[in-house]
Amino acid sequence: MTRPANKNQSKNDAYEWPRLENGGLDLDKLINQYGLQDEIDLIKRGCLEVLPFEELVRKLVLGKVNSTPLRIKFGADPTAPDIHLGHAVVLRKLRQFQELGHKIVFIIGDFTAQIGDPSGRNKTRPPLSKEEVMENAKTYQEQAGKILDMNRVELVYNSDWLDKMSFSEVIKLASKYTVARMIERDDFHKRYTEETTISLHEFLYPLAQGYDSVYLKADLEIGGSDQKFNLLVGRDLQREHNQEPQVILTMPLLEGTDGQRKMSKSYHNFIGLNEKAGQMFGKLMSISDELMWRYYELLSQLSVEEIGQRKEDVESGKLHPKTAKVELGRELVATYHCRELAERAAAEFDRVFRDKALPDEVPSFGVSEKPITLVDSMVQHTTTVSSKSAARRLIKQGGVRVDNEVIKDINYQIEFTDNSPEHLVKVGKRSFYKVYVKVNET
Amino acid sequence: MTRPANKNQSKNDAYEWPRLENGGLDLDKLINQYGLQDEIDLIKRGCLEVLPFEELVRKLVLGKVNSTPLRIKFGADPTAPDIHLGHAVVLRKLRQFQELGHKIVFIIGDFTAQIGDPSGRNKTRPPLSKEEVMENAKTYQEQAGKILDMNRVELVYNSDWLDKMSFSEVIKLASKYTVARMIERDDFHKRYTEETTISLHEFLYPLAQGYDSVYLKADLEIGGSDQKFNLLVGRDLQREHNQEPQVILTMPLLEGTDGQRKMSKSYHNFIGLNEKAGQMFGKLMSISDELMWRYYELLSQLSVEEIGQRKEDVESGKLHPKTAKVELGRELVATYHCRELAERAAAEFDRVFRDKALPDEVPSFGVSEKPITLVDSMVQHTTTVSSKSAARRLIKQGGVRVDNEVIKDINYQIEFTDNSPEHLVKVGKRSFYKVYVKVNET
């Protein structure tokens, strides 16, 4: 077989690839010849889809032969200051690419964030000022820096090129995509057939994001599974601009602590990257055993083999599931805080819950006032505390904890902030409940 | 009744309008009170639709009371250098508004003309250079000047504001319109259901044109019936920008000389404003009697009463239809050339066709070579001339005319230009035929 290329050849040079009888690339042969199996295993870990896989192999081979790292595109819209473990799934994948020597092109999507939804229909996308966007971008980078080596990242703002596009350039870009293809998109198709309003500008956002791939000459783009359509638009637009289209890689949407819905601020089932160590640890301990393995797969730095071993040990009874969960909590708190705080959180949790593991189902109560006094909450949210005076008595006796801390102040108020919208209340030795603040239309 | 407003009040001041029991404006009362009947009759002459009529009356009343002329918008895309009588229909209507004292805002649509169709699918919209556009705009103005008083026109180029629009401004504009509404448009709906490709940029052109109405604060927009959707988009966008929406006025598409299809260069049934007087007159004489009344209505400066009288005279036998047609030809040639040339053309036509009126159906032949020798054409296109030598003989004898001119040169070549793509050949006293050049895919 002819060697695909040498360092002096451009990436796009044509040469003889090993082929199967059906005309497809002989991937096994290539993977074997270039020793790509481990790299591919790591890339595919936890992924939902890699499309097309053949092109990924081809790009990896060419990258190796030409000693050129792949350009891995990731775009984040800085519409909110905080990110949670759901976002971390994609960032972890980027980290793996970084460890494999590839270049992360990290796009702050400040262009669309500043515009928001001009039709005003989508309340979750209000227009943001330049200052808000930059502030959000800053905290986003800080948090992403807990996972990625931000020094090695190529950080770009897409307003740099999208702000400069004129109407006639937008028309030219739009001419490269069809209405039918846009409407095929799951979400649009559903809304179109249901006769729910789709504003015309909503067709322009995927084009803007797709054009980022053209401008940045991305080799591969990573996103959550809900981003698949946008990633494909990038692929199409690159092809229309005579570029080799990017491979797309989608990651699953992480389930929240309830194990039911995707992790989201509005579902109160999230673990923020900026949450306090104890709180983060506690929330991780509250997830189901089944969900634990999902978090291991998508969030842990352990190898697939190590996780497999651990799971086997739990199944054979060699390891208690609670121990496995503590290990996960330790690792993640160490990642987002530090080893010492992780140990402390684990010890504290152990001390508090020594007598009784947190029950699988902790009752949760949403409150609309913020804050609420601990006494009021106890009367409203438990069946065992029947009056305010009974509540005060229990507090004075040291029998009540909020987020693992004993509260002795009978006037204590449970406060909610963006970073701690939920609190765990323990009354006596066996009664637990959560209170969270109900979010109004945000 | 309170007077609607005085000169010191703004146009939008609220006051008491005379109303009918159903809540609508009492239009009869208003028209009567402000003496608007003649003006409205002239405006409605030949129109297909005036929408909404009530708003037109309202605007006319306010204009009268405030002594403010209405701003009448008309947009022309300078994609080709020549215009024909089909275009003249709308220009005539503008002229009437001018005579009524209103302001014509004449938009040269150089923005879209320069872009053309970037998808390359629509071959009739190739991108044009700035120079070509300006050259076309110049000849367009010269020709429009035969109908309109261009000195009193507000002439604008929409690249002046559309070129300056940024991507984010386009997104904001697009947010004001919905996908469903765009697809409702006849043409788009048909193509969408037939699964014919619609490129996304095609949705942006109506927005651009509609935005012109916002930018120019149009009170009324005029267009051919094929423009109705675009005019309505302008209305919608003005409303979204908190402007009083423009009234729209559509004119029918004039039938070409064949009386069948709309006048169009590609159907070879047009009469160009820049055609020679004799040619224009001859073509007008070739239209059917029925079509003649249509041309009278849409192109003549005669009043509705005068045309009615003439028609009556023809029907009662008092006036020969040919005479009425000669009168129409005279008037239109005088309009686009001058009175003297009109008389000359009429006399010459009369002299040539004294013996025989042009038959109703003149055979037409499309030729692909350009030019063709007269001799070859005679052999190919007549049944009476059987050989080239016979053809040469007839020519030498002075028995052959091309476009009414005797040709004695046996090597004469029939040439086709953009302005004269068709020629009338007369062989002997009774044989006529037309030759035209077949246009390839333009």
Image (cartoon, coloured by chain):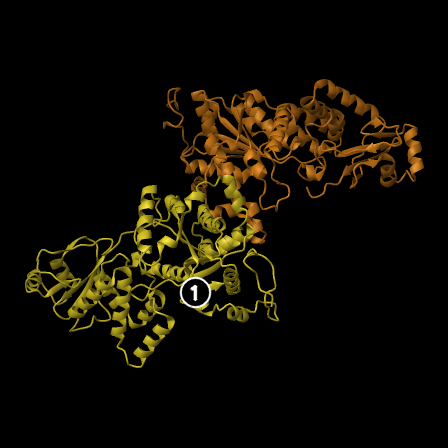
Chain colours: A yellow, B orange
To which residue does mark 1 refer?
A43
Vertical order, A353 against B437 (above or below):
below
- Subunit under mark 1: A
- Say whether residue A180 is visible: no
Q: In the rendered view, does A183 fall on the left or right side of B424?
A: left
Q: Residue at x 30, y 78 (%)?
A: A314
Q: Identify which residue is drawn at 26% across, 67% down.
A: A330
- Where residue A102 sits: x, y (%)? 44, 58
Rendered location of residue B434, percent (x, y) = 80, 36
Q: Nearer the viewer, residue B103 or B12?
A: B103
Residue B74 in the image, given as x and y percentages of width and height: 55, 31
The residue lying at 72 percent from left, 33 percent from top is B418
Q: Look at the picture and state if A354 lies above or below B371.
A: below
Looking at the rendering, which quadrant does residue B350 occupy? top right
* SS class, disc 1: helix
The amino acid type found where label 1 is placed reads Ile
User: Where, by quadrant of the figure, is residue B21 drawn?
Assistant: top left
Q: Quadrant of the N terminus of chain A?
A: bottom right
Q: Is residue B149 left or right of residue A410?
A: right
Q: Position of residue A294 (x, y in %)?
A: 34, 69
Towards the viewer: A394 or A130: A130
Counting other residues with Cα less than 10 Å from the Cα at mark 1, is it few (<14), some (14-19), or many (20 or more)?
Answer: some
Residue B286 vs residue A381: left or right? right
